[in-house]
Amino acid sequence: MTTTGTIEIAGLDGGRIKLTSEQLEDLDSRVQGRLLVAGDQGWNEAVAIWNGMAAKTPALVLQPTSAHDVAAAVGFARERGLLLSIKGGGHNIAGTSIAEDCLVLDMSGMREVIVDPEARLAQVGPGCLLGEVDQATQAHGLATVLGFVSETGVAGLTLGGGWGYLARRFGWTVDNLAEVQVVCADGQLRTANRDQHPELFWALRGGGGNFGVVTRFSFRLHQVGPTVTGGLIVWSAERADEVLAAYRELTEQAPRELTAATIMRLAPPAPFLPQVWHGRPIVGIQVCHSGANPAADLAAVRALGDPIVDLVGPKPYVALQSMLNVMEPKWLHRYWKTWFLPGLSSEFLDAFRSSALKVTSPLSQSVLFHLAGALNDREGDDGAVGNRDARYIGGFAGTWPPGAPADPHGPGPETVGADPAVLHRRDLRQLPVGRGRHRPDRRRLWHQLPAPPSREGHLRPRQPVPRQPQHPPGHCEQSMSSWEPSPFLRLVGAGTGKPDQTGSEPAERMETPSWLAPDPAKNGSGALGLTRGQPPA
Ligand SMILES: Cc1cc2nc3c(=O)[nH]c(=O)nc-3n(C[C@H](O)[C@H](O)[C@H](O)COP(=O)(O)OP(=O)(O)OC[C@H]3O[C@@H](n4cnc5c(N)ncnc54)[C@H](O)[C@@H]3O)c2cc1C
């Protein structure tokens, strides 16, 4: 830590608290981990989160290396009434891992994974990303249920419930949680499982955090792979009706070893897609088959024929788990909405298709994931995760670069393909979205609605999603028959990111896929190389 002066830090009561250099030294002496202030080496990485729109600047970061460090920091914060937040992988969509001017516990220094193949258990540090756990467990041909993007943090995903390709076989991620070690607000380290502190264990299994700082997760493992059949098949969105019908047929008959998601979007300028399709509307099905007979089980999809690309084939499970990483660099701005669905009615699929086709941002996408299976087998109240009657998740993921013009492509619901008047406010309310058992406070597994008010014993209130500007409906209409490149394909990336404390641009320090990288031919304007998008002759 480079500072020798006083630091102002946000208090739990909304006020400001001054920490003298002696107090900072006191904290430093109580812990092994690094204490960082703005300008220190590693600061940028420590405060970087996935959703650029939700970025905030804390006052102080501690990178604990042990449960002891965490307990010391919680005690220090409690004694002084400091606002404390906890960062796992930084992938929370609403950016809840960092509060403005707070003390952040950046758990990235606690990334140990210990696999016991005999007991089929993995002890996982709270700073681990999904890929690190997959790598360690797959070395033994084992896996637990984790998500689709391997740079997501294990901690936030698990505390929110968690699902991925294996959820249909083995349930929510938290259904595979054997035990948790957690430092509670009183500074005590507790072990929570079904026998010890069962209520705390229940809350941690999907409650979303704020019950303490988890210092270790223990997951049950299953035999998976290491080779599975998976990948993406892509068609022109002119065939969206057919493809969505085939997706419904596929998922209604699929064995639990098969998980499929469908995606509608403008084709990204990715090397795996022919250039002539870049920027054009496409529909894809992404699959993971971890059992026998993948060819027979995928027949309904393959029968559609004539795809733009078919990338489905045998591959290592860890490769499939990281296949979508390239689409999710950290610095972009995002706004997501998702719903748990009990089924895919024709009416819903029509609304989904027509809304998805209105998207004008080449970075946004509309998705449906199949969930039905093991998670439906348990009692509704088995863990705070709830949603035991969910069979699908539907979502719109709006994405735009920092500095892009706010209208018409800014962070309004339109960005995600949904005319608010048509889709979010009216049609979806009439569709079978949930069955009344979906309690509002349990529907934030992925879309991270603003959190409920903080409860007693919580470390801090979660941060609300920033209010979005409203845009007039209907401005992003785009019909399939009269398709031409969206103006957004030319506008995208015109701006740059907000400079951080050391003056560098977020885009420079983040991992950016080469095909999303700023185009030097455009005078470094950050034009993302997304200006092509010509329809085929
Ligand atoms: C690109 C992308 C893909 C995703 N895919 C999936 C998916 O396939 N399946 C799925 O289930 N979800 C998915 N999600 C949602 C994701 O699981 C949540 O956003 C989750 O919160 C991310 O966890 P994190 O640790 O990276 O986040 P963070 O932002 O670091 O943390 C999320 C929340 O958990 C709290 N927290 C973090 N660590 C601890 C700890 N040790 N103790 C107590 N509280 C803690 C934080 O304070 C914060 O409130 C995805 C998100 C993104 C951005």
Image (tube, helix red, strand yellow):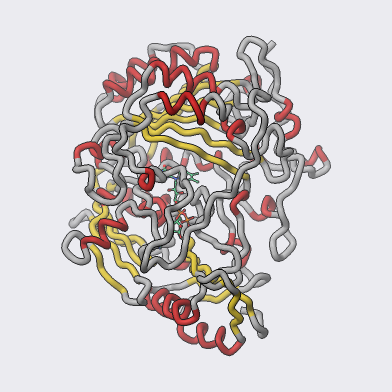
Height in image: 208 above or below 107?
Answer: above
Q: Residue furthest bottom?
A: 22
Vertical placement of residue 451 versus 77, above or below: above
Left-right relation of 265 to 202: right
Percent across and percent down for residue 518 are 72, 42
Residue 94 position in % (x across, y down): 52, 50
Tell me the quarter of the picture where residue 468 sits: top right
The residue lying at 27 percent from left, 48 percent from top is 142
Tell me: residue 404, above or below residue 293.
below
Q: Is residue 270 visible?
A: no
Q: Residue at x 62, y 14 (%)?
A: 479
Image-quadrant location for residue 186: bottom left
Q: As rendered, which of 227 and 164 lies closer to the eye?
A: 164
Does residue 328 appear left or right of residue 201 in this picture?
right
Please provide percent x and percent y for residue 364: 58, 33
In the rendered image, residue 287, in percent from the top left (x then y), is placed at: 39, 29
